[in-house]
Each structure stands twice: as structure tokens, then as C-alpha cells.
Amino acid sequence: MEINKTRLQQHFEAMSLIGKIGETGTNRPAHSTEEKKAFELTAQWMQDAGMKTHIDSFGNLIGRLEGKNNSLPVLMMGSHLDSQPYGGRFDGVAGVLCAVEVVKTLYDNNIMPERSIEIISFADEEGWRFNKGLFGSRGILGKLEEGELQRKDKDGITREQALKNFGCDITKFKQDEYKQNSIYCFLELHIEQGPVLDIAHKPIGVVSGISGPLWATLKLKGMAGHAGSVPMALRKDALVGAAEIIIALNEIATQIPGAPTVGTVGTLNIFPASRNIIPEEVTLTIDLRDIDLERRHKYEKQFKEKIEATAKKHGLTYSLTEDTNSEPRYCANWIKEIIHTQCKQLNIDAPELMSGPFHDSLPLSYATDYGMIFIRSKDGISHNPLEYSSYEDLALGTTVLLRTVTEILKR
Ligand SMILES: [Zn+2]
């Protein structure tokens, strides 16, 4: 049984045209018309693979290949088709299209599995539009939080409105949730988005777990004033405070050389943003990750102390709100073993590695056993139009995924 490399490549190429920016970039926001187009195209491919398809109330695209015994928990695969605003062609897309190729291969070989197989393209994995991600994968598990639907994008559109515009009936959330024990396991193939495999010259990696992110938003408030007349000693400059806090996060995250801890301030909004007004208000987003949760907690505490001290020093008030707080989650040993065995049989030397980025697997890990296959990313570049994984590597990963699925279906 072999996958069709040419077809797989054609699917990637067709998908790259939807929301295309520049030569190789993608902009497919969550719940957008571009994502809808991507869903329609993928649904067609899913149907060609014998699957029934629908879009649920969370805005997830779901394809289902009915098994002989549909009372058994489903084997679920998937990832996402939404992209960063200035993203590449492979992040998320790989996990959906390679899974579709796996099911298409099973279907063409007349394999009718005992348990049903589902592929989900999860809504809003990326999280930039409403400043909170993993929406669809949390949604199906009943893990949405209070007030989430009222979050607004930069145009003032709420999540609720965006979902309605997408055609979703938000009163149906409850019935679209997956019941406990209804998912046998979850498999996600994803590009690495980091340089480890590329540096080691390995096409495939077996993921050991996902280091959980802490996302927070900090709002610093000072006092606006004329940049020409307010003496330095009397200023309450929110941007000066922000600058010290950004440097502090960097120092905290690098205090143990070589440790996998990462800390980032990725956005900065300044009010009123005029060259001759002292910045009154600065909002910045914080992203802190570590495989070691205890260490992350310790760094979070250090960081909070630093914010407090900096605010005091510059006469600022502040509010710190937590947007996301997840702990590291480890892949199931039995799935990792199956993936390793398949790699060995294919003569692939596949190292085991942690994932710094989070994925839809993260919320799924609370509901079922999960496994992840990483595909080499050229130069480790991702969330960038230059993101690249070769079709050879993607085909190889799809073969590993197909063999893994086949093994799991025997259980
Ligand atoms: Zn992704």
C-alpha cells in the first residue's frame, strides 16, 4: 500500500493559492472566506477519500470515514488550515492534507476499518485574530472559557459575529462536543517550525511532548504630556517601563544557558503614538514556554516581581491578564513506539524531540492519547512566507503516518 506523492504535492499546491500573499506566503485568517474556501476544497478531497464531511458549530471542518463498528471510539487525525497573517504554506496544512492522503490510500485499497476515522481541520489554531488560539480543538472538548465569544479582532468583530458570518450556529456548541472516551487516539503530523531536524539532517522526528505556553497581556498606564516641556524627573512614561520589562523577560528566560525556556514579547501597542507626546499607555503580549513546569512557574514569579518594581519606579499602574496557561503534555508511549517502529522499518533515523510551539494536540491530550510526527523545516523557519518543507519529506512523513494508522487500526 503506497501513498500518491504526486497527488499529495498537487493538494499542497492547490491549497497554497487560497489566501496567497507574495510568492510563497499565506494569509488565511480563522473563520474567514479564505478559510471557507480552503474547507470547501479539502472537503472535496475528503469526499474523494470516502469520507462524509461537515462544518460544526465551532467552525471545524470534519471528515469521517465510517468504520464497520461505529460504536467504537474514533481514530482522529488533524491540524489546521488557518494561517498566520504573514504565514507559510505548510504550518497546519501538512497535518490535514497528509491525513487526507492517508485515508485516500486506505480507501483506494478497499480497506474498511473496524473503527471510524475522522480528520478535523480545527478552527483558529493560530490565535492571532482574537488573541486566543486552539479554539476549535478546545471547543469540541467543552473547554471554551467565559467571555471568549466576546473577544474582538482588530476590526472590532467579535468571535461570535465571525462564527455567525462563517455559517456556524453557536447555540449548537453542546451537541458538537465529543463525549468522554469517544476518541481512541489523536495523531497530528506537523512541520517542526524549528531548526533541530534540519541541523541534524533528519527528515522526520518523533515528538515526545509539547511544552505548554503561558500567554499574558500586560497593560501599563502612565501619563501623557508634551515631549518638549515635561521634565524627565516628572514623567510617567509607559513605554520606558515597557522597554525595561521586555529586557527583563529576555534575561529571565536566558538565565540557564542552553535550557529550552523561551520568552517573547511579540506585540506592543502604544497610545497615543505621537512623536511629541509622552506614551501614556502601552499594551504588550507575553509568551513564556518551558518543558519544565516548575521552572516556568519560578520564572513567572520573577517576571511578575519585575513588573511590579518597574511600574513603581516609573509611577505607572498596570494590569496583567492571563490569556492562556497550559502545562507541558507528553505523547503516549505506545503511539511513540509504533511511530519509531515504522520509521525503523523504513530505514529512517527519526530522533525524538519536544515541541516548543503548541498544536491542536495540546487540548486533545486531555481527552485522549496522542502522538505527533514532525517534518523537517528548512532553516527552522516558520510563521513566515519562507517556511519550507520538501515534498519528499512530506511524502515520507505521510508514509510513516499511514503505517502508524494501519498499526493502530489492528488494535
Ligand atoms: Zn500549526
Image: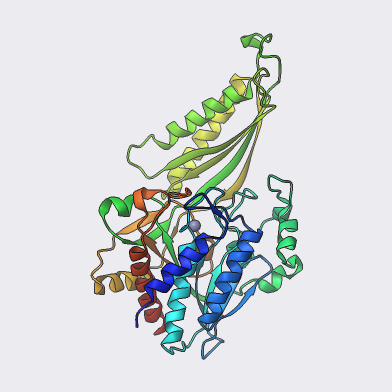
User: In this picture, is 55 found above or below 363?
Assistant: below
Query: Front-most of 357 and 11?
Result: 11
Quarter of the image for the C terminus: give it: bottom left
Q: Is residue 182 visible?
A: no
> Picture coordinates of residue 38 (x, y %)?
58, 65
Q: Position of residue 117 (x, y in %)?
A: 51, 79
User: Residue 75 location in percent, x, y?
Assistant: 49, 77
Residue furthest to the front = 23
Q: Residue furthest left?
A: 347
How many marks overall? 0
Observer-nearest of 395 and 397: 395
What's the residue at 32%, 51% (across, down)? 196
Q: Is residue 139 left or right of residue 339?
A: right
Establish if 347 lies above or below 117.
Answer: above
Is residue 37 or residue 122 the one in the foreground? 37
Is 40 left or right of 115, judged from the image as shown?
A: right
